[in-house]
Every structure is written in C-alpha cells, then in structure tokens.
Amino acid sequence: MQVGIIVLAAGNSSRLGQSKQLVQVGGIPLLRRSTEIAIQTTYPVVVVLGANAAAHQRVIADLKIQTVVNPAWQTGMGSSLKAGLTCLLQVNPKLEAAMMLVCDQPYLSQAQLQKLIVAAHQESKPIVASTYAHVIGVPAIFRKEFFPHLLQSDDDSGARKIMHQFAHLVYSIPFENGEIDIDTPQDLLHLPKE
C-alpha cells in the first residue's frame, strides 16, 4: 500500500503564548521530533506550515520532506489537512492511503505509527485511528476512498468529524498518553521527562 504522511503544524499556538512547534522535548523541537518519527516510516512526508512558517521551516530544513505553507491556516486544521493531501496527491497520484498526525503530541512514537500502518494493511476498515481518553483521533490513516471526504471537509473541523461520522468504519489502536498535547502553558507540565 502506498501511504503518504501529512504532519499538521500550521497553527499559531495562541493559547500557549509561544510556538508549540518549537517547544523542546529532550532538546528537540516538537515539530522536528514528530517529523523525524514520520520519516522513519520511509513513506513520503509533507509538513503543512502556516503561522511563523519561516521559523518553523528552519528546524526541519535539512530533512528529506516536502513542506507546503497553508495561506489559509487561520481558518482551521481542515484547511491545512486539505493543503497537505493536495500536495501528497500531486507528488503521487496513485497514493492509496494518507496518514495524518499533529506536531504537538509529545508521546508520539515510531511504534504507534507502525501499529497503525500494520493495521491499515491487515484490517478491512478504511480508517485506522488512534484512541485515547475515550475518543478517536490522530494519528490516523485514511484509505483513498476517503480522500474526497477529506478534500471537502470543513476548514475548521479537520479529520475528527469524518471519523465520528463514519465511526463504524474506523478500526482503532490504543495510544497511551495520546490525549496529551500542547495547547496551554499548563500542558507543558506533562512533557515527557527525557
């Protein structure tokens, strides 16, 4: 299965008061850390930037990825998702599945992505998603039959609305600590101690 990965990193971290993309875990900015984990899959990776694009580009400039700047990043994660998927499909029109992940889950691991990839190959359901704190979320893999839904999704809702709408078509994989993301200064207290 030909899979592409979209790393969503376009937001301006307004509630945090600083760039979440540049918050460090183990001395590595979250954006670089999540992008490096995505690269380890050996699948093509597109990073979607928006706010502070130049500063964020600098921390991943040496990585073998593609970046796309979403000029409409303020409209929401859905618009960034569409920008990333459009870019992936331009690079590989025969793409069979796309994985979405965000840059601010500090407990993201190569092992979690690998579990999703294995399930996407083995399971019949067209969406494989992570589950944590009683919700389904990202990282998640969508097979190509869902590309039209993703490309027509609301700018402000992203992939989660589609996962809820088609919950019966989602195969879920537990993601320990997946509910921890960096949105507020309080969230910084939950960073891994590496």
Image: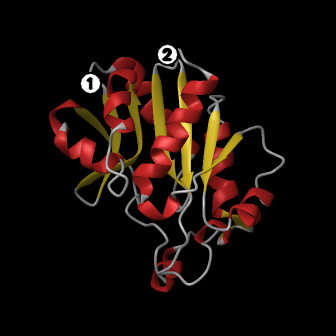
Q: Residues within 10 Å of mark 2 (few under 14, many from 20)?
A: few
Location of residue 110 with respect to 61 vertically, above or below = above
Location of residue 14 with respect to 41 vertically, above or below = below
Tell me whether the residue at label 1 lies in contact with that at label 2, contact meaning CB atoms closer than 8 angstroms. no
Q: What kind of element bears circle 1? A: loop
Identify the residue at image location x=34%, y=50%.
Answer: 137
| Quadrant including the C terminus | bottom right
In front: 42, or 18? 18
Q: How far across and how far down the image is residue 95, in percent?
A: 51, 20
Q: How far across and how far down the image is residue 29, in percent?
A: 70, 65
Q: In the rendered picture of this protein, how many numbered marks are placed on residues?
A: 2
Q: Is residue 191 visible?
A: yes
Q: Which badge, 1 or 2, is on the more N-terminal residue?
A: 2
Query: Which numbered disc covers residue 21?
Result: none
Identify the residue at image location x=20%, y=46%.
Answer: 164
| Quarter occupied by residue 54 | bottom right
Q: What kind of element bears circle 2? A: loop
Location of residue 34 with respect to 94 vertically, above or below = below
Three-letter code for the amino acid on which mark 1 is drawn: Lys
Q: Which residue lies under the disc numbered 2?
A: 1
Identify the residue at image location x=66%, y=36%.
Answer: 40
Q: Which residue lies under the disc numbered 1?
A: 125
Three-letter code for the amino acid on which mark 2 is drawn: Met
Mark 1 to mark 2: distance in Å?
Answer: 14 Å
Q: How far across and how far down the image is residue 1, in percent?
A: 49, 16
In front: 78, or 95? 78
Q: Is residue 111 visible?
A: no
